[in-house]
Amino acid sequence: MKLHEHQSKELFARYGIPTPQGKVAYDAEAAREIAKQIGVPVVVKAQVLVGGRGKAGGVKLAKTADEAEEHANTILGMEIKGLPVRKVLIDPAVTAKAELYLGIVVDRAQGAPVIMASAAGGVEIEEVARVSPEKIKRQTIDPVLGLQAYQARELGFDIGLEKKRVPEFVKIALGLYRVFVDTDASLGEINPLFISSEDALIAADGKLVLDDSALERHHDLEMLRDADEENQAEREARTAGLSFVKLDGNIGCMVNGAGLAMATMDVIKFYGGAPANFLDIGGGAKSDKVAAALRLILADPNVQAVLFNIFGGITRGDEVARGIVDALAQVKTRVPMVARIVGTNAEEGRRILASANMQTATSLEEGAKLAVEIAKAGVGN
């Protein structure tokens, strides 16, 4: 789950990270009043959950309250990378002598968080990594010990900070790590981290991406979710308790188990096909959940075939089969479907599907090949 800039910076401030004391406006008139309250000049910043706002014209400097109103009026009517701008953040303008980058991400290869810093802040860190990777300095964080002050100091010196600025940098780095851990984040980022004209370090922008799987522990953070910014299908999947990610292929996939779902997509690719989604219905899915999952798959107009790969362990094969039949009664479709069901009550499940005129397979390889052949032939379109 992504948080907006203003939400991230509010959390940062709670952990002692210095941030501009801005406010959110939902209309141009409110932007004008906020600019008056906090004093000009101000920066008017679009609040959308995508990068590249500045390049798209979503970040503008206003030297007067009237100008803040004009900029807000323009920005609130924009779409940035397909997302409508519904609110703007009015921040006090900061004169910066330099722009740094500071971020923490989970490094899956090392099985540990990694903190990164760069003197080349203010631009997308991916671009810095591509063009000048030597400018990004890293420290691996021991998951048990956490980020140590000496690591943050070393990082500060590695990016060329003057000695007098290093203690404040260490404080910010340790604060960012505490936010990262306490919110169960997968990414915490300050870009840019300004060195102001008064020699202070200020988090001018902020980004937090939270682990959806940990939100059960953070009901207060769950309340910050912006449903308007989510993909409609993924929002519906979350409401139904499904793990769903839309992809660009044409073979819909319904699988129980994340690992099995990944393997299913790999086998589809191996046989020359392209999966249209990742979808894990979970270990104990009942017929209503399966029906909801099938509706999600069939809502994608690119889907030309659907492959069900169900292992009947916790989930019974006949329950899944009834869910498929129930869904087909609700959602009329000509898209051909292939089902591979093994395990608990698999034989009964296959019998139910056969009675619904659905093709069945006894192995994943057989099912994937059949689904790819059907999709390429355009059967049912």
Image: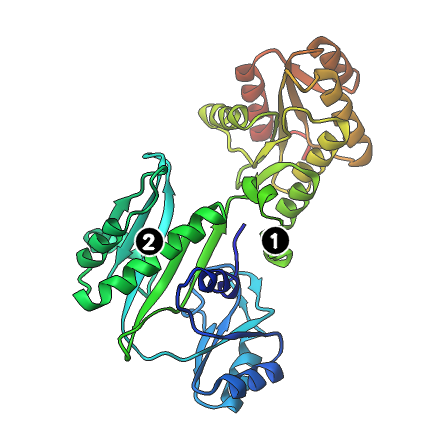
Q: Is residue 263 left or right of residue 344?
A: left
Which residue is pictured at 52% across the width and 53% down the height?
2
* Mark 2 nearby-residue class (10 Å; few <14, some 14–19, many ≥20): few
Q: Which residue does the numbered mark 2 point to in the structure image?
A: 126
SS class of the residue under badge 1?
Answer: helix
Amino acid type of the residue tagged 1 in the rendering: Asp
* Residue in view at x 40 percent, y 80 percent: 93
Quarter holding the C terminus? top right
Any part of residue 246 in sight: no
For the residue marked with disc 2, what is the amino acid? Glu
Q: Is residue 224 above or below residue 236?
A: below
- Give the vertical position of 237 relative to 207 (above or below): above
Q: Residue under circle 1?
A: 220
Q: Between tags 1 and 2, which lies in front?
A: 1
Instruction: Point out residue 156 in the picture as x, y percentages from the top left corner.
Output: 22, 58
**Residue at mark 1 to residue at mark 2: CA–CA distance:** 31 Å
Give percent across and percent down for residue 141: 31, 42
